[in-house]
Image: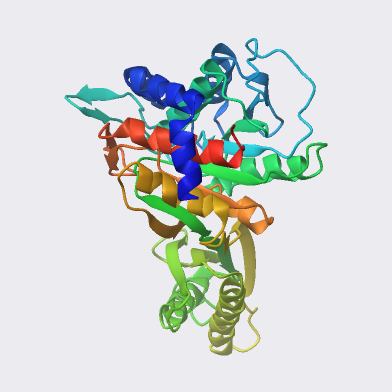
């Protein structure tokens, strides 16, 4: 794979594309700031999606569209074909390579997303996660179109919805479930651009299950009805039981109580109380076993509270609502896609750190599609906070890495 990356770096069209990325670095940064300033809360990404679709058409991708889920799609077909700003062409027949970045941010509609530039630093909610990924996605596509890179396989450039939190990877699930049955077959590789950075190569998918758990009972006056099964007590018992679960380090597997609430007043036993849970593991079997263990602990909490209730009073009921289900798995270290990323890092003078995270790459990995997630260059901090920032330190190298990995998988030259 090192030899392949070296050959790509010497390829006339790849060299031209690299020069294009370096020459337009400030334009990419300006696009990053302008995209970040368009609100895109999870579930309300339409305005930002429309702008990305415009950019896809402007740079010359073909078959540009917004699907029913809200994902933006644009194609680069083989043989260096240049599009005409979105005209429809026959769908590519070969299995594609997918390069993707998510549209949404963790910030609600009430959070201002204005971007400020302070010296070399851009500051604003979502400026890195994932305005950087989106700007890099457009930059790679523009460089490949402008320099007419001859790919043997078509490339699908996709901006996806619903990657963050409650989105539950909705966009990429829709995208790939459709692509699996399309005439061009399932993708041979999927590369997600997510945030900043250059060292990390995410090839292990951190899976999760997220639950909203509600305990319901008769409630009543805190004095007169004292002794009925109390949902708030059950929540406390459940939290304590879950906190005492053994911690598994190999594979690392976690269960966290992340929110809780309930009740209506200081002198009332609540009719319901609730807690939210976040279960995670890199290993599907470990996550499934944790799920069984957690359910048993919740049932025990309800049973313990019910045993203490006044005889003849109604028992507690427990309800579980699945809020999120992100699959886990991995693309092996030895797979050509992972090795291409490692070799690209090495060729660009940086070590590669193989690691895990929860990204759009989770879904293709679970579907048997080789997938990784990469940062798009630069440095960033305060992710998921209103004080999020980005500095364009070797930012172009992150985009060049994405170009090299995509080109390797698309069999350039």
Q: Can residue 17 be seen from the camera position used here?
A: yes
Give the colour scheme of this rendering: rainbow
Q: Quadrant of residue 240?
A: bottom left
Q: How many marks?
A: 0
Position of 409 compared to 78: left or right? left
In terms of depth relative to the viewer, which is nearer, 132 or 298?
Answer: 132
In terms of depth relative to the viewer, which is nearer, 88 or 297?
Answer: 88
Position of 381 compared to 212: left or right? left
Which residue does the image show at 57% across and 57% down from the upper left? 335
Which residue does the image show at 50% across and 50% down from the upper left? 1
- Residue 225: x and y in percent read 52, 76
- Residue 327: x and y in percent read 61, 60
**22, above or below 227, in the image:** above
Taking the view exactly as shown, the residue that stands out farthest to the top is 84
In terms of depth relative to the viewer, which is nearer, 390 or 18?
Answer: 18
Q: Quadrant of the C terminus?
A: top right
- Residue 361: x and y in percent read 56, 50
**174, above or below 278, in the image:** above
**250, above or below 335, in the image:** below
- Residue 115: x and y in percent read 30, 24
Q: Can residue 165 be seen from the camera position used here?
A: no
**150, above or below 406, in the image:** above
Which residue does the image show at 76% across and 18% down from the upper left? 89
């Amino acid at each position: 794979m090192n030899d392949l990356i070296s050959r790509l770096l010497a390829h006339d069209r790849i060299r031209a594309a690299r020069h294009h990325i370096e020459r337009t670095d400030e334009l990419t940064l300006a696009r990053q700031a302008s995209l970040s300033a368009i609100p895109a809360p999870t579930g309300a990404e339409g305005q930002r999606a429309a702008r990305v679709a415009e950019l896809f058409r402007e740079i010359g991708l073909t078959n540009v569209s917004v699907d029913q889920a809200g994902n933006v799609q644009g194609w680069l077909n083989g043989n260096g074909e240049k599009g005409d700003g979105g005209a429809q062409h026959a769908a590519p027949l070969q299995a594609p390579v997918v390069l993707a970045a998510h549209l949404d941010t963790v910030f609600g509609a009430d959070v201002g997303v204005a971007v400020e530039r302070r010296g070399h630093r851009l500051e604003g909610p979502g400026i890195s996660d994932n305005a950087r990924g989106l700007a890099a996605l457009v930059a790679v596509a523009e460089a490949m179109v402008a320099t007419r890179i001859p790919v043997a396989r078509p490339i699908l450039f996709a901006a996806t919805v619903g990657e963050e939190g409650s989105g539950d990877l909705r966009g990429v699930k829709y995208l790939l479930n459709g692509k699996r049955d399309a005439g061009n077959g399932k993708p041979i590789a999927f590369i997600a651009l997510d945030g900043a950075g250059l060292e990390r190569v995410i090839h292990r998918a951190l899976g999760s299950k997220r639950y909203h758990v509600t305990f319901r009972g008769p409630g009543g006056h805190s004095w007169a009805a004292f002794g009925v099964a109390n949902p708030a007590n059950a929540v406390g018992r459940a939290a304590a039981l879950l906190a005492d679960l053994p911690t598994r380090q190999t594979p690392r597997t976690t269960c966290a109580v992340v929110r809780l609430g309930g009740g209506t007043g200081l002198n009332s036993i609540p009719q319901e109380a609730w807690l939210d849970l976040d279960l995670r593991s890199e290993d599907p079997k470990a996550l499934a076993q944790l799920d069984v263990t957690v359910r048993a602990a919740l049932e025990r909490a309800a049973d313990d509270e019910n045993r203490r209730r006044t005889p003849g009073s109604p028992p507690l009921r427990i309800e579980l609502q699945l809020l999120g289900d992100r699959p886990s798995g991995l693309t092996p270290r030895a797979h050509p896609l992972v090795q291409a990323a490692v070799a690209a890092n090495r060729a660009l003078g940086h070590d590669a750190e193989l690691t895990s995270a929860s990204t759009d790459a989770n879904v293709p990995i679970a579907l048997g599609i080789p997938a990784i997630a990469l940062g798009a260059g630069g440095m960033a901090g305060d992710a998921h906070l209103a004080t999020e920032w980005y500095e364009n330190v070797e930012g172009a190298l992150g985009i060049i890495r994405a170009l090299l990995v995509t080109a390797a998988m698309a069999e350039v030259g």
